[in-house]
Amino acid sequence: MIEDNGTADAAHCKKLYDLAVEYCASLCKQFPTIKLSNIVSHKEAHAKGRGSNHGDPENYWKRCGMSYTMAGFRKDVEKALAAQNAPTPTVLPFTDVAADAYYYEAVLWAYENGITTGTSKTKFSPDKPVSRGQMVVFLQRLYELIKK
């Protein structure tokens, strides 16, 4: 996880720590079977009979004067993973759907999930009736979304 290069530079240690958090979060996202509890140091792995007992990374963090812990590291990975999974906020391109309209959240969901693209790039036309053809397309798109 973190390579101990013999330095005791706190700034370098923080960069390595942040990089390791980002990397572990990326691995957890890519491989969902990896649980936070699976992220262990060499010391923790050794205590479970699965690794060598050379103390990384805790001994490195201590030498650099950092108060990092593996419990804190796992929490930071959890936060980074949540940030990676956080959906990018979408702004509706439709100028005819007011943010305080009772149907705004439903239109936003339908737009974000590809159910509707509106009647033009900037119009949703909320007061126009829906044709049978449009309804079938909406239902097919919903079915495809559910099937995933």
Image (tube, grey):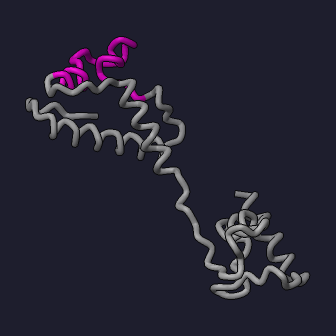
Q: Quadrant of the N terminus?
A: top left
Answer left or right for 2 relative to 110.
Answer: left
x and y percentages locating residue 103 in the rendered image: 78, 67
Q: Nearer the viewer, residue 34 or 107?
A: 107
x and y percentages locating residue 132 in the rendered image: 91, 81
Membership of 71 in magenta stretch: no
Answer left or right for 135 relative to 54.
Answer: right
Membership of 45 in magenta stretch: yes
| Residue in the picture at 28% in, 27% down | 68
x and y percentages locating residue 61 in the rendered image: 21, 26
| Residue in the picture at 86% in, 76% down | 136
Q: Find residue 144 and report its image quarter.
A: bottom right
Q: Find residue 27 and report its image quarter.
A: top left
Relative to 133, say whether 74 is above or below.
above
Q: Quadrant of the C terminus?
A: bottom right
Farthest-out residue, right: 132
Relative to 114, say whether 34 is above or below.
above
Farthest-out residue, bottom: 120
Relative to 88, say whether 31 is above or below.
above
Relative to 41, say whether 105 is above or below.
below
Residue bounds of the magenta highlight: 39-62
| Residue in the picture at 40% in, 29% down | 39
Farthest-out residue, front: 100
x and y percentages locating residue 62 in the rendered image: 19, 22
Answer left or right for 129 relative to 148.
Answer: right
| Residue in the picture at 41% in, 30% down | 74
